Image (cartoon, rainbow, N blue to C red):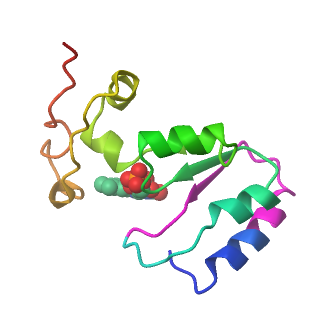
Amino acid sequence: MIDSDPAGLYTWLAARLNDYRLAYLHVMRGDLYQKQSGDVMTPIRQHYKGVLIGNMGYTGAEADSDIAAGKIDAVAFGTSFLANPDLPARFKADAALNRPRPATFYTFGPEGYTDYPAFNPS
Ligand SMILES: Cc1cc2nc3c(=O)[nH]c(=O)nc-3n(C[C@H](O)[C@H](O)[C@H](O)COP(=O)(O)O)c2cc1C
């Protein structure tokens, strides 16, 4: 979703969500079409007191550094997991990742879901 004032909206929302005993807050920091710009994770971290999971466009390196810096508690990977079902093993080995193929994202059948090359540690 896209908003004209994402930081303002998320700041308000993050503070309000403290009233609920949520297990975690999972945030897409941008929209799928990359039309919305602006950092929403910083104001959310400032105002939300619970566990914060970031999503949208994170690399393994950015996830590591943002978690180490305390900006977020965890990252949810979408398309990189789709293209790399063995993503944790690849991160651990600092191996190359398969590139996601958007053309097969919303299609039926195995193509784009089970045919990405498996990680082969050598
Ligand atoms: C094929 C496909 C299906 C998705 N289905 C859903 C869904 O059903 N519900 C949802 O909240 N997000 C869905 N998403 C969005 C992802 O969960 C995630 O937010 C998005 O891919 C951004 O993360 P990424 O940059 O790590 O890929 C889908 C994404 C893709 C590519």
Residue 17 within the segment the image draws in magenta: yes
Q: Position of residue 41 (x, y in %)?
A: 64, 60
> In the figure, is residue 99 to the left or right of 43?
left
> In the figure, is residue 11 to the left or right of 103?
right
Residue sitting at 33 percent across and 49 percent down?
79
Q: Give the answer, above or below, for where 100 lies relative to 92.
A: below
- Could you say which is closer to the camera, residue 69 or residue 48? 69
Q: Position of residue 73 (x, y in %)?
A: 65, 40
> In the figure, is residue 16 to the left or right of 32?
right
Q: Position of residue 39 (x, y in %)?
A: 60, 68
Locate the C terminus by quadrant: top left
Image quadrant assignment for residue 31: bottom left
Which residues lie in the magenta part? Answer: 13-32
Q: Furthest-top residue in view?
A: 122
- Could you say which is closer to the camera, residue 34 or residue 21? 34
- Could you say which is closer to the camera, residue 41 or residue 1? 41
Ligand 1 positioned in quadrant:
bottom left
Residue sitting at 27 percent across and 36 percent down?
84
Q: Position of residue 104 (x, y in %)?
A: 17, 55
Residue 72 within the segment the image draws in magenta: no
Q: Is residue 76 visible?
A: no
